[in-house]
């Protein structure tokens, strides 16, 4: 008998649970974080607004709202599966729909904030996951008030947005019954009462007016300045043209030699914003004066030819190829100067007035440089470049017009190249 009674009670309990479960046909809803497309609110305000919206929807009883912590765990798994690094990359439908399906939700709610012409617009769309289509939408606008935190208007807008999502209508105002004119009932005339002098009512005391200080206007944070391309790793091209000047080196004199044109082409790469590696290609010329070659003293360009000939040097050409390292320093955020050093090959070639020529060529020459640049556009600088090319001494290959090339210890005059420069940043 007891077993029969226990079986009946258990069956009744199961049937009542199944009945209540079957009657609960509420939509299981996943509320996505509000997207601030206007970029007018703090991240913590947007998070609090999302929690407020989730709580208001749960309080209506129309939806079964998924718990916040459970939704966060599912978001982490979805980001790992979709190979996304942050929630900012998971605000599109393509990422949020799989998130809602992972939560076993029936629908997801996507909400965004827009700002146009001083008016905020908060828009929401209810997406049915089974159809992957929007089944309901809602929009509420509110104005921007000067000196008032826009988060206040956002809360009021969310409060008005929830009734649109659940399909509630505003309550109608019941009008009071109309007043009908009725005839006054005839009453017996009362005996006249004695007139009593009434005292005037006491004057009300003036209220103290409390003046509230106006709230200070919120300072709008300045927008971040665009990054200077010179602070990033990038390709650079430096081109310069100027004057090529001969400099005495011990007994290698520059008598009878006048300055002439110099050209520089230096492609390179700047890394870490302050350092660069360049390949300097220099080409220059030197002119000879009317002074005969036989009066030149010591070595240098004049020693490339036999001393017995009393001929004049017609033209001198110089060239060098040197990898260089440059260090850049910024001053006043618009002016840059740099120091450079390099080692490479240099050559000096001379031509006599009778057409004969001779050359000096050696490796291991040193180049020291200094320059500055002033930007005239985001990718172009105007500047000045000064290079001092130090020709090394020792064994060098000397080729003369009357004998074969030979190796001998020889000194060559140094060079100074002063030129204006254009720098292009890729």
Image: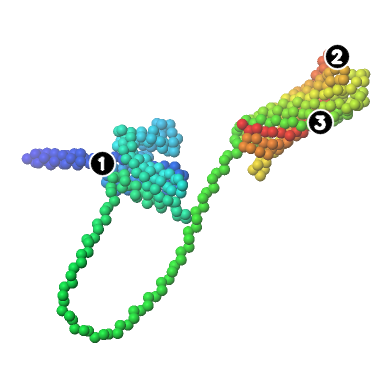
How many numbered circles does the render carry?
3
Task: Work out whether residue 409 can be spotted.
Answer: no
Q: Position of residue 326 (x, y in %)?
A: 68, 33
For the residue labelled by badge 2, is the local secondary structure a helix, a strand or a loop?
A: loop
SS class of the residue under badge 1?
loop
In percent of the image, x 73 and y 29: which residue is there? 264
Position of 257 compared to 153: left or right?
right
Which corner quadrant holds the N terminus? top left
Please tell me the numbered disc located at residue 101.
none
Residue receiving disc 3: 245
Taking the image as shown, residue 90 lies to the left or right of residue 284, namely left
Question: On the rendered image, what quadrant is the C terminus found in?
Answer: top right
Of badges 1 and 2, nearer the viewer stands 1
- Residue 240 appears in the picture as rendered: yes
Q: Position of residue 67 (x, y in %)?
A: 33, 42
Dot 3 or dot 2: first in sequence order is: 3
Q: Quadrant of residue 231?
A: top right
Ranked by sequence position, the earlier of labels 3 and 1 is: 1
Q: Dot 3: within a 10 Å radius of its alpha carbon, few (fewer than 14), some, or many (20 or more) residues?
A: many
Residue 169 to residue 343: above or below: below
Q: Disc 3 and disc 1: Cα gap in Å? A: 91 Å
Taking the image as shown, residue 100 lies to the left or right of residue 339, namely left
Q: Which mark is residue 26?
A: 1
Residue 364 or residue 313, whichever sits in front: 313
Q: Residue at x 37, y 51 (%)?
A: 156
Q: Quadrant of residue 311?
A: top right
- Name the side, left or right, on which 304 lies relative to 169: right
Find residue 299 and report its horizontal and vertical position in percent.
87, 25
Which label sits in the foreground, 3 or 2? 3
Residue displayed at 86% across by 14% down: 403
What number is the disc on residue 403?
Answer: 2
């Amino acid at each position: 008998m007891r077993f029969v009674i226990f079986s009946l009670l258990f069956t009744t309990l199961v049937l009542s649970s199944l009945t209540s479960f079957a009657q609960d046909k509420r939509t299981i809803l996943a509320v996505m974080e509000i997207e601030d497309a206007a970029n007018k609110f703090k991240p913590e305000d947007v998070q609090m607004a999302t929690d407020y919206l989730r709580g208001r929807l749960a309080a209506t009883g129309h939806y079964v709202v998924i718990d916040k912590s459970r939704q966060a765990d599912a978001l982490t798994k979805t980001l790992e599966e979709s190979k996304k690094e942050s929630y900012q990359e998971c605000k599109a439908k393509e990422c949020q729909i799989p998130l809602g399906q992972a939560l076993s939700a029936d629908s997801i709610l996507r909400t965004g904030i827009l700002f146009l012409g001083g008016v905020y617009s908060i828009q929401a769309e209810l997406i049915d996951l089974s159809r992957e289509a929007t089944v309901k939408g809602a929009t509420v606008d509110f104005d921007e008030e000067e000196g008032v935190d826009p988060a206040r208007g956002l809360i009021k807008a969310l409060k008005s947005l929830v009734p649109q999502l659940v399909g509630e209508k505003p309550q109608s105002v019941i009008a009071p019954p109309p007043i009908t004119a009725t005839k006054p009932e005839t009453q017996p005339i009362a005996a006249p009462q004695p007139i009593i002098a009434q005292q005037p009512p006491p004057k009300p005391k003036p209220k103290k007016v409390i003046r509230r200080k106006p709230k200070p206007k919120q300072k709008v944070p300045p927008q971040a300045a665009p990054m200077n391309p010179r602070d990033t790793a990038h390709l650079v091209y430096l081109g310069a043209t100027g004057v090529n000047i001969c400099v005495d080196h011990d007994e290698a004199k520059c008598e009878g030699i006048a300055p002439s044109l110099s050209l520089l082409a230096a492609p390179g790469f700047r890394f870490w914003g302050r350092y660069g590696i360049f390949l300097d290609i220099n080409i220059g010329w030197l002119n000879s004066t009317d002074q005969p070659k036989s009066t030149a003293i010591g070595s240098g360009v004049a020693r490339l030819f036999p001393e017995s000939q009393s001929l004049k040097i017609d033209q001198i050409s110089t060239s060098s190829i040197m990898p260089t390292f440059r260090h850049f320093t910024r001053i006043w955020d618009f002016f840059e100067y740099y120091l450079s050093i390099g080692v490479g090959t240099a050559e000096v070639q001379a031509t006599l007035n009778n057409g004969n020529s001779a050359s000096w060529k050696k490796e291991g020459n040193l180049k020291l440089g200094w320059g500055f640049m002033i930007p005239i556009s985001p990718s172009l600088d105007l500047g000045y470049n000064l290079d001092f090319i130090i020709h090394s001494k020792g064994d060098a290959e000397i080729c003369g017009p009357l004998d074969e090339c030979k190796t001998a210890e020889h000194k060559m005059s140094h060079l100074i190249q002063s030129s204006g420069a254009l720098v292009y940043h890729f």
